[in-house]
Amino acid sequence: MNGQCPTCAQDLQGCAFFFDVDGTLAEIQPRPELVFIPAAILAALGRLQTVGVPVAVISGRRLADLDQLFEPLRLPAAGVHGAERRGADGRLRQLNLDREALRRVGDELFQACARYPGLHLENKGLAFALHFRLAPELEAVARGLAEDFIRRYPALLTLQPGKCVFELKPRGASKGEVIREFMREPPFGGRVPVFIGDDLTDEAGFQAVNALGGHSFKVGPGETAARQRLDSVSAVEKWLDALVRPLKPEVYP
C-alpha cells in the first residue's frame, strides 16, 4: 500500500481514523431516521479497512443504528457518545448504568414532550435527545425540559447541546475518553489518531486527539479545539477520496 493522509503529510499505515457521523459523514436531516451515508463515503471507508488502516465511528447514535447506517461494513464503533463501544475484536463494552432509572426518565420525558407536538424525543435507551429542528420556536422549551431533568437526575445524566438538539447523555460518556480507549488497543495503538467531527459533542474528541499528538478536523464553522477544518460533508467526501485515490490499483481501482 502507498499513500498519505491529505493535509496531515502522514503515511496512512501509521494512522488510525475516527469519524463522527451526523454532520460529518452524513448530511443532517429533519429527523434522525432519514440520515444516510453516501455510497462514495462507504466505499472509501471500506477501502481503508481492506488495506488494514484502522477506522472507527464515534457517534451519539446507538451501535445498532450505526450498523444499519454503515451496511455492509461492520466497523469498530462507539455509540451514545461512548456509553457503548465495540472494539476491533468484536467485544462489547458498556458503562455501568442504572437501567431502571433510565427507563423512568424515558417515560417521564415522553409524557413531558407529548405536550409539544413539534418536539421530537429520540429515546436511545441509554440517552435521550430532544430535537427541535422542525419547530425552532421550541428551543427554549427543549432547553428547559433538558435542564430540569439534569437537575432531577444529576448523578445519572449530563446535558449535551448540539445542532437543533439538547441531549441527555449518561454521566461518564465522552468521545474523548472513548478515543483514548481505542488508542490503548490493537490495531489502533501506536498509530497517529485522526478525528473528524462537526458538533459540540466532538470537542472532547478533538482535545483528546490533540493531546495524543494527532490531527483534529472540524466540519463547518464555529469555535473549536480542532486544529484543521473542512467546510462540509461534501468536503469530507472529497477529502476521503483524496485519501484513498493514491492506493495501488489492485486495492483501489
Image (cartoon, helix red, strand yellow):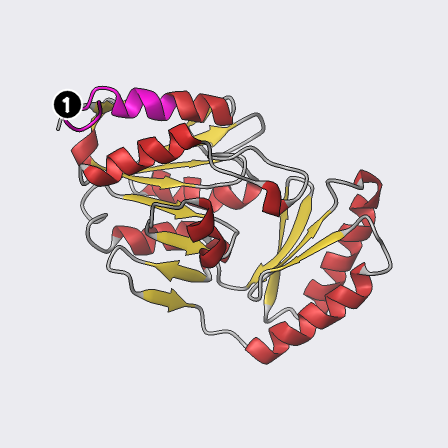
Which residue is depicted at the point 58% across and 28% down? 222
Which residue is depicted at the point 43% across and 26% down? 236
Q: Is residue 247 magenta?
A: yes
Q: Residue 233 placed where, x, y %?
A: 50, 27
Q: Which amino acid, mark 1?
A: Lys
Q: Name the outermost residue toward the bottom.
A: 100
Query: Most prominent secondary structure in the magenta stretch?
Result: loop
CA neighbours of label 1 inside 10 A, class few (<14), some (14 to 19), many (20+): few
Q: Which residue occupies the foreground of this view, 10 or 64?
A: 64
98 sits to left or right of 252: right
The quarter in which the N terminus is drawn is top left
Q: Which residue occupies the foreground of this view, 244 or 152?
A: 244
Q: Residue 57 placed where, x, y %?
A: 39, 46
Q: Can residue 135 be seen in this view?
A: yes
147 sits to left or right of 59: right
Which residue is depicted at the point 42% across and 31% down? 39
The quadrant where residue 238 appears: top left
244 sits to left or right of 197: left
Q: Residue 6 placed where, x, y %?
A: 30, 21
Which residue is depicted at the point 59% across and 71% down? 155
Question: Would you name the residue on which mark 1 appears?
Answer: 248
All told, the count of numbered labels is 1
Question: Element type at marker 1?
Answer: loop
The quarter in which the C terminus is drawn is top left
51 sits to left or right of 105: left
Q: Is residue 6 visible?
A: no
Q: Magenta region: which residues?
A: 239-253
Q: In this view, does 4 lie above or below 207?
A: above
Q: Is residue 47 magenta?
A: no
The quadrant where residue 44 appears: top left
Q: Is residue 105 above or below residue 233?
A: below
Q: Residue 122 placed where, x, y %?
A: 65, 56
